[in-house]
Image (cartoon, grey):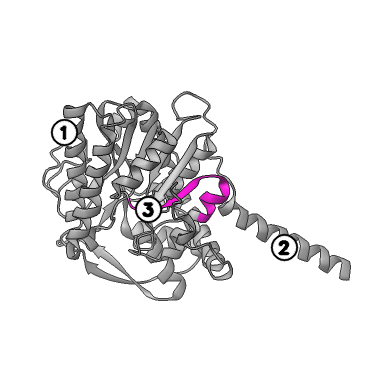
């Protein structure tokens, strides 16, 4: 009986370790061995301790690239999550640098040290509603720092830039589904305006200095290691705590819809765009299948096996009532085809969330000071 108990305990311990390793192991995201993805290149990823930047840096490294990630560990949300992402990247072999992309001297030094083939620019001040009350943060981080990077690329004409834009560039009058040909000069919030400015600046620098740049309009990205200010994290956290969640509707009482896109699909799209290295282009990256917010909440409830306490309320005017990506352009040029269903992605996220709550309370994670650059 005692041997059986010991054996059972060992099996449970191994199962627990396996569940932990699924979020800590080196990624093996793609079996694709074609030439559509970057391999054996030297790549700078900005915003590497952020949600999408973290996944991009990890995936590029798994494909045999030499990856340098830079992040300033902005306290917009819990820095421990960013430190945990950076720690995972570091133990995988990604070089992580605690630095600001507005620091032209630091960027110049990094380019001199590493001779980058590609830049994946994910660093940004994110969040639609936050931009309403903190507009200057968005102008500084998303516009001023972007110009700093573009100015540096003038001296490195062989380095291709792939940068994050957003579905927020589309205004309320945009045709559904959103296409890249639609007018996107009337965004409903400062965040979207700053991202549209990125696209216009990238076009100007391509025209003036022949800088190769590709902008990617992301549609509601979610998944493991996601941001605490986004709906999947907020809903899951509050449901598990038994707190009430706010489910927003439009002014006329209609349900909100979002083109929720799983992070692995987004990352594959980024890497395909990076390798494609268009002289100048903009692509929608979404799943192409909107889900209503109540339906999304229902998927979380099913995955957690917990019923949410819901409170219906009107959405802020900065929010679009519906997002829906037409990905035809990305399909044709990048062979972009998202694979993860929303229900599958939600389940993966909630699995990670439960693991992360235990992980962050039980582990000592190296602080951001660990990654301060040691310039010679």
Tell which circle, 3 or 1, labels the residue nearer the N-terminal end. Answer: 3
Residues 361 and 302: in front is 361
Please tell me in which quadrant of the rendered image residue 198 appears: top left
> What residue range appears in magenta?
87-100
Answer yes or no: is residue 320 visible: no
Q: Is residue 94 covered in magenta?
A: yes
Q: Residues within 10 Å of mark 2 (few under 14, many from 20)?
A: few
Q: Is residue 136 covered in magenta?
A: no
Q: Give the tally of numbered discs.
A: 3
Q: Which residue is mark 1?
A: 204
Above or below, 248 relative to 93: below
The answer to whether the residue labelled 2 contacts the one labelled 3, judged by CB atoms less than 8 Å apart, is: no
63 sits left or right of 205 in the view: right
The answer to whether the residue labelled 2 contacts the one labelled 1, judged by CB atoms less than 8 Å apart, is: no
Please tell me in which quadrant of the rendered image residue 205 appears: top left
Q: Which residue is mark 3?
A: 99
Above or below, 277 relative to 320: above
Above or below, 177 relative to 144: above
Q: Which residue is mark 2?
A: 12
Residues 240 and 357: in front is 357
- Give how far apart the Cα atoms at labels 2 and 1 are: 58 Å
Answer yes or no: is residue 44 visible: yes
- Percent from the top left, x then y, of residue 191? 21, 53
| Mark 2 or 3, closer to the camera | 3
């Amino acid at each position: 009986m005692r041997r059986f108990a010991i054996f059972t305990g060992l099996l449970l311990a191994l199962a627990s370790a396996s569940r932990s390793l699924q979020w800590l192991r080196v990624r093996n995201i793609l079996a694709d061995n074609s030439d559509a993805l970057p391999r054996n290149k030297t790549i700078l990823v900005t915003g590497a301790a952020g949600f999408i930047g973290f996944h991009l840096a990890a995936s590029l490294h798994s494909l045999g690239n030499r990856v340098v990630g830079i992040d300033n560990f902005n306290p917009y949300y819990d820095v421990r999550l960013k430190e945990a992402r950076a720690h995972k990247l570091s133990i995988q072999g990604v070089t992580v640098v605690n630095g600001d992309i507005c620091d032209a001297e630091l960027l110049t030094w990094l380019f001199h040290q590493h001779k980058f083939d590609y830049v994946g620019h994910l660093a940004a001040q994110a969040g639609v509603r936050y931009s309403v009350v903190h507009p200057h943060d968005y102008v500084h981080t998303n516009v001023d720092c972007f110009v700093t990077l573009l100015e540096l690329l003038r001296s490195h004409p062989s380095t291709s830039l792939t940068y994050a834009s957003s579905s927020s560039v589309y205004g309320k009058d945009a045709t559904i589904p959103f296409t890249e040909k639609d007018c996107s000069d009337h965004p409903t919030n400062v965040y979207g305006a700053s991202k549209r400015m990125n696209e216009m600046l990238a076009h100007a620098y391509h025209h003036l200095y022949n800088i190769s740049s590709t902008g990617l309009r992301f549609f509601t990205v979610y998944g493991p290691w996601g941001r605490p200010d986004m709906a999947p994290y907020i809903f899951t956290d509050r449901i598990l705590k038994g707190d009430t969640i706010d489910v927003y509707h439009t002014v006329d009482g209609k349900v909100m819809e979002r083109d929720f896109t799983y992070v692995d699909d987004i990352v594959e799209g980024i890497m395909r765009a990076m390798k494609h290295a268009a002289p100048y282009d903009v692509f929608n990256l979404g799943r192409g299948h909107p889900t209503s917010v109540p339906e999304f909440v229902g998927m979380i409830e099913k995955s957690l096996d917990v019923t949410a306490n819901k409170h219906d309320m009107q959405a802020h005017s900065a929010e679009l009532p519906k997002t829906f990506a037409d990905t035809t352009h990305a399909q044709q040029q990048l062979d972009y085809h998202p694979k993860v269903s929303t229900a599958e992605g939600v389940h993966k996220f909630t699995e990670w969330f439960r693991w992360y709550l235990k992980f962050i309370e039980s582990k000592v994670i190296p602080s951001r000071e660990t990654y301060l650059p040691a310039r010679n």
